[in-house]
């Protein structure tokens, strides 16, 4: 009898400690054409489907095989809309951070407009479906917050980019420009006066771009895409989002303040137990006695678009190495390809980086790639091209696990010097492994943490109690400008009036000569 009582007690404790959520209907919106972005979002949605939730996902990437509890709504028009933009990445290198800001917000507008105007999405919006939660990739896609209002469901934002203005503004996370670098600048958290000045100006510039350029466009898209009645987008932006899941971790980034509703789940897509590689790749890497170099410029930038001179620089350097090379090359042929180089349009990057023979990762410096490299303790050579890639590579150089080769300076000499420096100095590998140990030292796996917060928001009907009051304050109130005006203005006013009074009193006081004249 006591055994049954003890068993009942244990079950009760477990249930109380880990409250369950009944199967919920969850809508995921991951609209970008970057496969890497989709991998992060789909990892979470697949885990939720495994747990029994009914998942619907809007994206350009349908599942090859049907999954239980997982439904795709596939967008097709977006490819044609964004192709001219993504194919011109390499033509805009070195144009300056302000142009970068304008281009990346324009990119967000392209994604938002083409997704919401896709026939499959229009049909979905006009359906009578209902959802318990919306998970939205926050990537300059504010108009898509309309899904939360339209389906009368709480919303969780998910960032594959890390902390940025378009995520921090959703939950009120502060970003002091004195030590939080703008993601478009290659600064660290220890800035000189000049850097702090530039960082502040950059933040103000971005705020003006959002207020006067991006928001009017996003509002127009929102008004056309979702039926009335609905609140203004500016109001929805302040109230719709319960939390943001942030693809970041302090061990691989810089420490900074977060509100309760912003949760770091960086690397939740990384396989904690690496999957088996395809037999041919496994054999290629196993037999690489001098190690393997992996080269990929990410999902948006295509190596095949490299100018011939830069492409040949890579080929000439690779041909001189003892190491084998895996190159993400988006074509069947690569002229003058050396025997030690193997090309493929897409590689299982996470599992390749986990291989013990991996020596160096040549990358564009995107957050997902650098996060995977650090988790597996692989040093990186970065060729930043766009967005936060410059910031990520600044972190890598400061952390001693990476080197940068500016795209405009790519030459056989520069590449050979960087690769040989990394292969010849063990400190880069050691520094990457130290950060890997810090990164892995977590009380809970990032994916489990993400699932917990998703279910927490569902359990607590949007979890309004974690919403910070800063979202209700105006700019003047948030920065206490009215209080500062009183604290500074009143003493100044008193001083001014006192000075005027004393001056006036002194000016009307009769002099001694005047008194003598009167007495005479």
Image: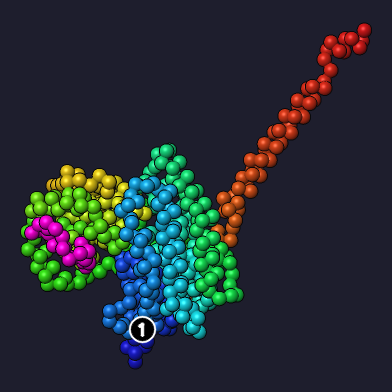
Quadrant location of the N terminus? bottom left
User: Would residue 263 be visible to someone looking at this image?
Assistant: no
Q: Return the x and y of residue 231 as percentages of the image width and height.
A: 59, 69
Q: Return the x and y of residue 477 as percentages of the image width and height.
A: 60, 53
* Magenta span main SS: loop
Lateral position of residue 395 relative to residue 21, left or right: left
Lateral position of residue 439 relative to residue 517, left or right: left
6 within the magenta span = no
Please name the residue shown 17% across and 43% down the image: 413
Q: Return the x and y of residue 415 as percentages of the image width and height.
A: 18, 47
Which is more toward the observer, 195 or 129?
129
Q: Return the x and y of residue 3 as percentages of the image width and height.
A: 32, 88
Which is more toward the observer, 85 or 127?
85
Lateral position of residue 319 relative to residue 374, left or right: left
Q: How is the image coloured?
A: rainbow
Quadrant location of the C terminus? top right
347 within the magenta span = yes
Q: Secondary structure at mark 1?
A: loop
Asked where in the image residue 72 lies, by quadrant, the reply is bottom left
Please name the residue shown 31% across and 61% down the image: 300
**Label 1: how many Cα within 10 Å (few below 14, some 14–19, many 20+):** some
Lateral position of residue 484 relative to residue 251, left or right: right
Identify the residue position indicated by label 1 in the image: 69
In the image, residue 501 sits, relative to residue 200, either above or below, namely above
Q: In the image, which residues are magenta?
A: 328-348
- Which residue reaches farthest top? 520
Please name the residue shown 31% across and 67% down the image: 35
User: Would residue 508 be visible to someone looking at this image?
Assistant: yes
Please name the residue shown 31% across and 57% down the image: 366
Which is more toward the observer, 469 or 300?
300
In the image, residue 460 sits, relative to residue 304, either above or below, namely below
């Amino acid at each position: 009898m006591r055994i049954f009582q003890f068993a009942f007690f244990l079950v009760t404790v477990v249930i109380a400690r880990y409250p369950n959520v009944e199967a919920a209907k969850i809508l995921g919106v991951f609209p970008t054409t970057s496969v890497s972005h989709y991998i992060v979002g789909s990892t979470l949605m697949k885990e939720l489907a495994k747990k029994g939730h009914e998942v619907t996902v809007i994206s350009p990437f349908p599942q090859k095989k049907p999954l239980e509890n997982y439904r795709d709504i596939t967008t097709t028009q977006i490819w044609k809309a964004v192709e001219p933009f993504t194919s011109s990445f390499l033509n805009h290198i070195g144009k300056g951070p302000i142009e970068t800001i304008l281009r990346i917000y324009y990119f967000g507008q392209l994604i938002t407009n083409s997704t919401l105007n896709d026939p499959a999405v229009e049909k979905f919006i006009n359906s009578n479906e209902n959802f318990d939660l919306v998970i939205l990739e926050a990537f300059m896609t504010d108009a898509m917050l309309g899904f939360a209002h339209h389906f009368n469901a709480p919303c969780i934002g998910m960032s594959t980019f890390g902390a940025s203005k378009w995520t921090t503004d959703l939950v009120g996370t502060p970003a002091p420009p004195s030590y939080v670098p703008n993601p478009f600048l290659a600064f660290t958290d220890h800035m000189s006066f000049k850097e702090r000045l530039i960082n502040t100006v950059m933040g103000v510039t971005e705020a003006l771009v959002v207020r006067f350029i991006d928001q009017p466009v996003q509002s127009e898209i929102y008004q056309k895409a979702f039926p009335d009645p609905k609140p203004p987008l500016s109001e929805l932006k302040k109230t719709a989002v319960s939390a943001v899941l942030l693809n970041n971790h302090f061990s691989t980034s810089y420490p900074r303040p977060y509100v309760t509703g912003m949760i770091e789940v960086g690397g939740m897509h990384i396989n904690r137990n690496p999957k088996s590689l395809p037999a041919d790749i496994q054999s290629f890497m196993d037999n690489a006695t001098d190690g393997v170099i992996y080269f990929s410029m990410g999902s948006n930038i295509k190596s095949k678009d490299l100018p011939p001179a830069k492409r040949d620089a890579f080929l000439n350097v690779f041909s001189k190495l003892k190491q084998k090379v895996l190159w993400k090359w988006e074509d069947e042929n690569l002229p003058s390809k050396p025997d030690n180089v193997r090309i493929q349009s897409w590689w299982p990057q996470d599992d390749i980086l986990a291989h013990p023979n991996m020596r160096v990762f040549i990358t564009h410096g995107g957050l997902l790639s650098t996060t995977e490299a650090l988790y597996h303790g692989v040093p990186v050579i970065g060729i930043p091209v766009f967005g936060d890639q410059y910031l990520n590579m600044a972190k890598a150089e400061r952390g001693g696990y990476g080197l940068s080769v500016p795209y405009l300076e790519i030459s056989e000499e520069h590449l050979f010097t960087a690769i040989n420096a990394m292969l010849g100095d063990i400190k880069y590998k050691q520094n990457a492994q130290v950060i890997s140990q810090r990164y892995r030292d977590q009380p809970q796996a990032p994916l489990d943490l993400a699932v917990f917060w998703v279910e927490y928001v569902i359990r607590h009907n949007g979890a309004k109690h974690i919403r910070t009051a800063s979202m209700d304050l105006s700019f003047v109130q948030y920065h206490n400008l009215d209080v500062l005006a009183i604290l500074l203005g009143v003493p100044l006013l008193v001083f001014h009036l006192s000075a005027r009074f004393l001056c006036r009193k002194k000016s009307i006081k009769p002099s001694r000569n005047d008194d003598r004249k009167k007495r005479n």
